[in-house]
Amino acid sequence: MTAIFVTATGTDIGKTFVTAGVIRHLRREGRSVAAVKPVVTGFDPGAPDGSDPAVLLAALGRTATLDEIARISPWRFKAPLAPGMAAAREGSTLDFDAVIEFSRQEIATPSDILLIEGIGGVMVPLDARRTVLDWMAALNLPLILVAGSYLGTISHTLTALDTLARRNLRIAALVVSETGGSEVPLADTIATIAGFAAPVAVVGLPRLRPGADHSAFGEIAALL
């Protein structure tokens, strides 16, 4: 089985949109696909339909019941904050070792491909000492790195690339997802990032409506 970790240069960049699009593409190819998003913040159990886990479940062809959401996202916090901060709001902490163990159990479950979606950006704190980077390093999986096309994204993306390289993590694909309302041309952002990212493949994804498909998802899937 191939397992991939999906991360980003920041929050609200498009990880879930990219993950769901790749899932749909792989399923149309007849592949057996599994996906989890172990840690979620900003989750309202009274209105789960628009949540990231619900989007992934829809792409997987599964109904987004609370039980199904709990299955793919065991750690859910209501406050839209970094996980450690959100957990503290609820008088708890996020068990980093348990997150790693859950991820490894999912990797060991048979399927053609598993997508593990992280939370926020590469350096988002999970607890007082560990970040998403530590989670990725513990699993040592190939990555999909999602970046935006807003002004400033080039610096953020190159910083993320440098950070990941220092931990010897391999990037299978770097996706530049067009930021709504950005005055920076998507093609220019892609070209500049690609010049620094080589030999990492850079895939451009234009702004799309929720649930829409695009050839870019096939390009990403081919790199996994």
Image (cartoon, grey):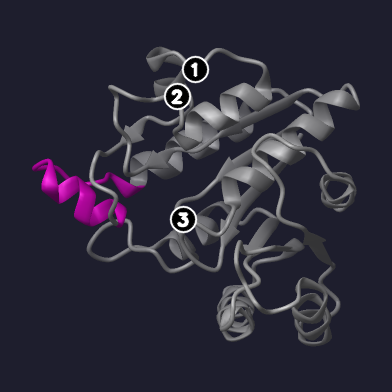
Q: In the image, which disc is placed on residue 64? A: 1
Q: CA distance from mark 2 to mark 1?
A: 7 Å
Q: Quadrant of residue 27?
A: top right
Which residue range is magenta in the image?
82-96
Whether pointer 2 and pointer 1 mark residues with C-beta atoms closer than 8 Å, the reply is yes
Q: Is residue 219 left or right of residue 6?
A: right
SS for callout 1? loop
* Residue sitting at x 55%, y 80%: 156
Q: Amino acid at mark 3?
A: Trp
* Residue sitting at x 69%, y 63%: 178
**Residue 205 in picture, x, y percent from top left:** 77, 57
* Residue sitting at x 46%, y 31%: 50
Within the magenta stretch, is there residue 168? Answer: no
Mark 1 residue crowding within 10 angstroms, few (<14) / some (14–19) / many (20+): some
Within the magenta stretch, is there residue 86? Answer: yes
Q: Amino acid at mark 1?
A: Ala
Mark 3 residue crowding within 10 angstroms, few (<14) / some (14–19) / many (20+): some
Whether pointer 2 and pointer 3 mark residues with C-beta atoms closer than 8 Å, the reply is no
Q: CA distance from mark 2 to mark 3?
A: 27 Å
Mark 2 or 1: in front is 2
